[in-house]
Amino acid sequence: MNTEKLGLTKFDSKLTMAFLYVAFISLLIGGLMGLLQTLVRSGTLELPWGIDYYQVLTVHGVILGLVLTTFFIIGFQYALMAKTVGISKKQGKYAWLGFWVMLIGTTMSAITILLGKASVLYTFYAPLKAHPAFYIGLALVVVGSWIACFVNFRQLYVWKKEHKGEKSPLLSFMVVINMLLWFIATLGVAATVLIQFIPWSLGYAETINVLVSRTLFWYFGHPLVYFWLLPAYMAWYAIIPKIIGGKIFSDSLARLSFVLFLMFSIPVGFHHQLTEPGIDPTWKFIQVVLTFMVIIPSLLTAFSMFAMFEITGRRKGFKGLFGWFKHLPWKDVRFFAPMVGMLAFIPAGTGGIINASHQLNNVIHNTIWVTGHFHLTVATTVILTFFGISYWLIPALTGRKLTFKMNKLGIIQTIIWAVGMSIMSGAMHIQGLLGAPRRSSYSTYGGTEQATDWIGYQMAQAIGGSILFIGIILMVYIFVNLTFFAPKGVEEFPIAEEESDAEPTPMFLENWKLWVGLTVALILFAYTIPFIDIIQQSPPGSPPFDW
Ligand code: HAS
Ligand code: CU
């Protein structure tokens, strides 16, 4: 079995593949729901058999935003950890336990949604009420993912004990940062689900404190987006250089940017609640400032990507201002797909900065602009990078080869994705500026002039959505091919090396106590006083709004 040669045992490969199966099945189901939504919203389709628009929207958001991402990320991270620091048999057993807990939880929540008992969207805002099994299922997914956190922490701990005084492999450091971020963030969602939603949905509590639940949700909801982004950054920093024949630009800079993400991702949830009454504007302002701090590590990342591309190109002898750019390996899908993801992140990140600007947020909040924003970030930058990873990871795990034909199909897939998303997300951004709401089914709004302006953009979204669905079918086809049918062979697991003359990475970057301590301090600073305020000043809790 060639995967053994790559430092991945059959056992490790099976583990990661189990997570990837769930991820790609989710892609297919969730993608189909997305297509249905754009068709309904453009007025071209009425859902048959009493299926409700908001039910479809919940499946879409939960299965793509929460299930696909979490499963792909945890599976990918296990492969990175196995490859860089190793995984013991015992750790592997716990990893499987986590997988099953997550899968059982996912299935429970999925059933409630499919039965129409949980059409509450992926943010499950109170007072919309779902069946208790929906919340219990979500709690299980979180608990399962915590098992993954502790397995990853343990893996690095054991490695460190055996390699005293050495710095940890970059990718294992990044995985541990991402899992720390996830663990601290999910405490918020676990608290609201366990203390508020489950008792309330079971009928033990008559009312729910809406503002507390939303605050706890966004305490989790913003770091959630960086939990999606950081695995993509892992590939950008440490894998793409190898694919293009270069070296890691700076190990220290990469670690610093991850540490900054850990510290600044969490105390910023209020930028999703800027229009909400009940939160003191001073604290909203403070969290907006912190949001601008969390932009810095992305700017550091952009800088190191450009530097790495240019240095690699010039080293290969390509001259002129942009010679290095033209000569990047555009025909290698392992590079091309993430690169298109990076390019998309330029407008996507700019949109994020607009959202975070308090005054501008008033213009776009609750409009479909926001939907456009997150389809560029998570559904383009992140997912195209995940596809880019899949082209080498799956064959490396299954002992197969990425053939010329599949590489070409991957390039076509990427182009289809870029075109479909430009149309769909572009139309969403413009329509949002024209005031069109997000999270809403088709309506003519009584034929008002403003709503008439929106319909053309809805059509464009349906066209973009249909193109994207073709992209999804292609990607699932590639997944099946790489898993079951591609010819046997050895596919490289590309991990880049550092520049040989690089300055040594300062050891304080691995001072976990310092970083976790600062993270907790920042969270306490940003949340304690406003949270006390929210609890003390809240209006009476809300009874459920049950469909
Ligand atoms: Fe966001 C809403 C602010 C990034 C996802 N965001 C959302 C929602 C989602 C989401 C899902 O402040 C909706 C939640 C809901 O359902 O209500 N977002 C930001 C900011 C950033 C940001 C400041 N978001 C993301 C990422 C996401 C994501 C990443 C997913 C993965 N977002 C907001 C705000 C809202 C919001 C408000 C609430 C809106 C509202 O009112 O509801 C920043 O992190 C962005 C920083 C990024 C950059 C870009 C750097 C560029 C790079 C690429 C370099 C390219 C290269 C290519 C090297 C500054 C790194 C080379 C090219 C060559 C030509 C060679
Ligand atoms: Cu956010």
Image (cartoon, grey):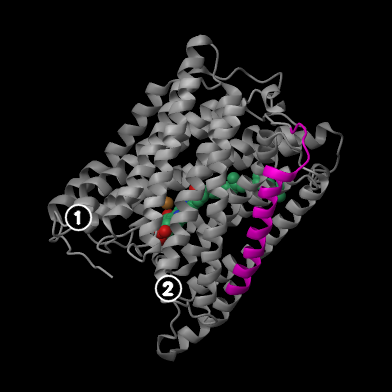
Q: Which residue is mark 1?
A: 202
Task: Assess whether residue 47 is covered by the magenta stretch.
Answer: no
Find residue 85 and report its image quarter. Answer: top right
Task: Assess whether residue 478 is covered by the magenta stretch.
Answer: yes
Q: Residues within 10 Å of mark 1 (few under 14, many from 20)?
A: few
**What type is the residue that disc 1 sits on?**
Leu
Alpha carbon separation for disc pair 1 and 2? 25 Å
Q: Is residue 342 above or below residue 448?
A: above
**Left/right of residue 60 with respect to residue 520 in the rendered view:** right
Asked whether the viewer can see residue 58, the reply is: yes
Foreground residue, 513 or 41?
41
Q: Which residue is mark 2?
A: 51
Secondary structure state at the residue bearing disc 1: loop
Q: Residue at x 52, y 31 (%)?
A: 174
Secondary structure state at the residue bearing disc 2: loop
Task: Please provide the residue range marked out in magenta.
Answer: 462-491
Q: Residue at x 57, y 43 (%)?
A: 20
**What type is the residue that disc 2 sits on?**
Ile
Q: Residues within 10 Å of mark 2 (few under 14, many from 20)?
A: few
Find out if the beta carbon at label 1 lies less than 8 Å from the nearest ligand 1 atom.
no
Q: Is residue 398 above or below residue 277?
A: above
Find residue 466 and report its image quarter. Answer: bottom right
**Left/right of residue 309 with respect to residue 52 in the rendered view:** right
Assign the N terminus to one quadrant of the image: top right
